[in-house]
Image (tube, rainbow, N blue to C red):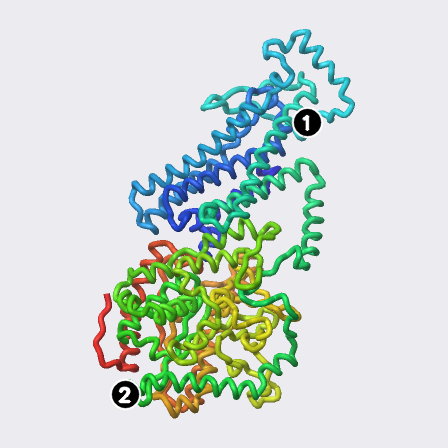
Amino acid sequence: MHIKKNQLLVMYWLILIGFVTGTFVKKFGVPYLFLDPEYAGNVGFTSFFIMGLACGIFIMAFNISSYILNSFRFPFLATLAMPFQKYSYNNFIIPGTFLVIYIIRIVLFQYKDEFNDAQAIFMSLFALISGITIVIFITQRYFLLTNKDIYKLYGFEKEDEESADFKALGRLDTNHKKKKKAPSSRTVWRVETYISFPFRIKLVRSASHYKDYMLQSVFKQNHINAAVVEIIIFVIFITLGLFSDYTFFRIPAGASLLLLFTMIIMLSGVFRYWLRSWANTLFVVLFIVLNFLSQFESVNQRNRAYGLNYGIKHQEYSRESLEEFASKKNYDADMKSTIQVLEAWKQKWNKRGVEKPRMVLFNSSGGGVRSMLFTFRTMQALDSVLQGDLMSHTAFITGSSGGMISSAYYRELYRSRNAELQKANMDNRNPFIENIGKDLLNATAFSASVSDIFLNMQRVKSGNYSYIRDRAYAFEKQLNENTGFILDRALSDYRDAEMKAEIPMLLISPTIINDGRVLQISPLPVSYMVESSSNSGDPYAITDGVEFSRFFADQDAVGLRFTSALRMNATFPYVNPAVSLPSMPTIEVMDAGIRDNYGLKNSLRFLFVFREWIRDNTSGVLIIQVRDTYKNVRMEDNSVKTFFQKLTTPFKNLSGNFIIMQDYENDALLQYARAAVDAPLNLISFQLPEMEDKISLSWHLTRREKNFVKDIATNQANTDALMQVKKLLDPPRTYSLK
């Protein structure tokens, strides 16, 4: 019946099976939300118990919606004691299949990827099954106490069906003027047997001698009781959204997704029950109306960067204004300002007896937590080799996504907790690397499930301004919690330290998705990082970017939260919302990897702008590139084999080769840079090789993936790269690594 009549209900189960088996969106880590659920920062009995509760709620919602939509097809149910319980018990095949698959996948995942022993796995399964059992028991008990069959509803005993009282009761049918027509033979399914608890097979008795309104009134009374359960679940869901800022209410993201599916099933079930054949038409109309209303910000709240002032006149975003801000005057002033920074950087080495130090430009790629972990561990290894001088050698840091989050975290630790950092660098299981490898997906997915999809009117205050509280806020909050709030600063807090070269300059460069330009975010003025006709001398040059701090000066650009800048740089489509900025028209920004995944374009532009100073004041430049993907990727068979592949392959191959195409372009740009810069220029890459199963591009990693990333940072190839760095920078000391 479900396959023929209720394909949408079946689809939810297929999606869930795809999630837990890794068939769907494994690349982005969604299966981990179900196989490794996290609650209050831990995976264990409590988190699996909550998953069990959510799974039980989803199963019962499936049964309730299915019962509401399909009970009329089985009129014999109204003549049985506990009709809903009988229906649910005979509706076990689809939920039962999912649970078997889910349990098997949990066992395999917890054993192979999380290295848990049999006892821990057993306790997790016990918690999951207990949660499911409790919900089913409570729900069934509720229906047992409230639902009535035809005998309880009309007050006669089963054995008195042929009595005069029963026949007289049946004649009341003539008094029901608004009674519904009897179901036609096409809508009533032929059923000969059903399963009675526990494993008894019983014959179905005919219900043709019952009056139609009697059968329908039984189902109607059952449906009303079911609606009460749906209201309770809806209240639970809304409560979780309202109090999501509190850890207690922040249930595992997998559980919140199950509750979201529960809400959708129940709402769609109600629509289909009341509207019948008009339901699909109404869904289409609602979609058109909501799509129209979504253009108004009062209905569709856009995400904003925390710390910016959106309450004043927005900055004009036009070709003329971009040219004005990227003027030759600003270019020269900012270049002069940055030369002061470079002079301060050089002076530090002069005091140590080095006349012309070699400048390091540090680049890190995007790639979620895998990039965060690999970048941080590589920086630790480099700093160990250089005896704590990595940040002293480095003048400029840039990159995208997760790699830049780690680079910023490492830079801040160097500034505020350097003694602890240097001690921790000798151990690849230190607390700092554990912090940077913590989950960011759970809080983000939870907020997306319980808040963002519905009309979200909750606000959060940052400084003097108020913003909508959505999954972007949850992401930043979780990042701050993971890193001990060490990055919870304004952009301006780094200005003096960068100006004095106490820490390297750090350039954050998200992509403006409106027109493909780059947004250059720095506490220092950096208009020289923007190409334009006025500052390049080329009358045909197009302004290719926006210098954030000058362009949005009136909107309090220096008050931007540093974590918001990092988030803008790591905004992967759909995972986090695109950030709207206070311009007219509104511009939105996303991941820096769209234009420059490795930060090399930024580094080469910086190198080109200051080529003369570098030639006269340094012994050369070393670009250190940390990649979360292997440059020489293995060849795969992407040839077209089926009709479906013929339709999808052009888009799949284009998106799949997006990063590789950047490599081709970067190699050419590096050749041009070597020809243009009159100074030694070296590039050394640290690369993350592929596992047999690719590490997910996600904000969550398994324990096995984390261990692999930590250990591979000092494999033979990367150790050779370390030795090359040591040789070029030549610190007069020995090194050691654990």
Left or right, 586 with respect to 244, comes to right
Q: Amino acid at mark 1?
A: Ser
Please indicate, yes or no, whether residue 672 appears anywhere in the rendered image. Answer: no
Horizontal and vertical percent position of residue 397: 42, 75
Q: Which residue is mark 1?
A: 185
Residue 575 against residue 277 in the figure, above or below: below
Q: Residue at x 55, y 38 (%)?
A: 233
> Above or below — where is 724 with respect to 207?
below
Name the spot of residue 425 as percent of width and height, x first: 28, 67
Identify residue for label 2. 353
**Picture quarter with the C terminus:** bottom left
Is residue 420 toward the left or the right of residue 81 in the image?
A: left
Q: Quadrant of residue 713?
A: bottom left
Q: Quadrant of residue 496?
A: bottom left
Q: Are marks 1 and 2 in contact (CB under 8 Å)?
A: no
- Give the secondary structure at mark 1: loop
Q: Earlier in the sequence, mark 1 or mark 2?
A: 1
In the rendered image, the vertical position of residue 386 relative to residue 590, given as above or below: below
Instruction: Tell which tag, 1 or 2, sits nearer the viewer.
Output: 2
